[in-house]
Amino acid sequence: AQRVTQPEKLLSVFKGAPVELKCNYSYSGSPELFWYVQYSRQRLQLLLRHISRESIKGFTADLNKGETSFHLKKPFAQEEDSAMYYCVPPGAGSYQLTFGKGTKLSVIP
Amino acid sequence: NAGVTQTPKFQVLKTGQSMTLQCAQDMNHNSMYWYRQDPGMGLRLIYYSASEGTTDKGEVPNGYNVSRLNKREFSLRLESAAPSQTSVYFCATKRTGGITGELFFGEGSRLTVL
């Protein structure tokens, strides 16, 4: 089964400080992982997918197979980064696994 | 393109009342999903539909029914609402094939059961 764990429910950082949102996974087979974000009163949207290795809004996430992690990082937090973040596996076929509890990021001005 | 549209956006029910949440998509996606979001619980899958004509239970299906009316529409029904069903409900779609795992969400429907 594909499972992810986000150990922090809430993460508070000051504006300009580095941010790391943790995600650990337990998988059989090659993992594919995504980060979704939900800004206040907005719909969830895809932020990053690991296969593309892209940087969106200054965020990056590297898959570390040794540590089975897919942490989301940003060197300098901005107030507009305050949101709920979910680390998500793709699901098996059409079945979409539960997102999990997510991490609420609060950037303090 | 509207993407994924949910109605209603807000609803207040009394315990025992019934209601249907509607979801419609114009992206021609095969798979559709209903989630509920509760504080501290994240998103939990209620039901999903891999394609038109099929539906399957997710993690928390009790108290709900669904109908995949056609490729565009996937409705969620509460037959006898309970306070435990107070939540924000999200509909999502996923294209079969392409990039696996990319879900497209509606704006959510906030339901309060008194």
Image (tube, helix red, strand yellow):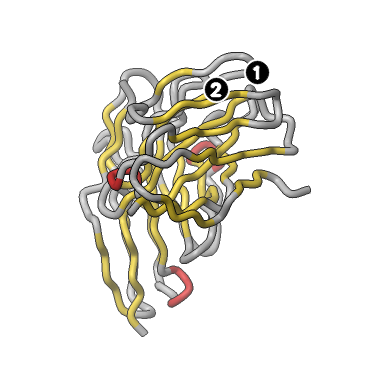
Three-letter code for the amino acid on which mark 1 is drawn: Glu
> In the image, A14: left or right of B24?
left
The picture places residue B86, in percent across and down from the top left corner, at: 35, 49
Quarter containing the N terminus of chain A? top left
What residue do we see at 48% from left, 73% from top? A80
Residue drawn at x 30%, y 36% as measured from the top left: A4
Q: Residues within 10 Å of mark 1 (few under 14, many from 20)?
A: some
- Left/right placement of residue B95 relative to residue B114 reads right
Mark number, residue B49: 2
* Relative image position of residue B73 (x, y in whole percent): 66, 31
Q: Is residue A3 above or below residue B112?
A: above
- Measure how far apart labels 2 and 1 are at the Cα level: 7 Å
Q: Secondary structure at mark 2?
A: strand
Residue A51 horizontal/vertical position (percent): 52, 36
Image x and y of residue A92, in percent? 45, 20
Q: Amino acid at mark 2?
A: Ser
Q: Is residue A24 left or right of residue B102?
A: left
User: What subunit carries mark 2?
Assistant: B
Q: Residue furthest bottom?
A: A109
The numbered mark at residue A26 is: none
Label 1: state its secondary structure. Answer: loop
Q: Is the C-beta separation of discs 2 and 1 under 8 Å? A: yes
- Residue B96 vertical position relative to residue B109 in the rendered view, above or below: above
**Image quadrant in which the C terminus of chain A is located:** bottom left
Query: Picture quarter containing residue A83?
Result: bottom left
The chain identifier of the residue carrying mark 1 reads B
Q: Camera-side residue: A89 or B69?
A: B69
Question: Looking at the image, which residue is at 58% across and 47% down?
Answer: B106
A59 or B56, nearer to the observer: B56
Label of residue B52 in the image: 1
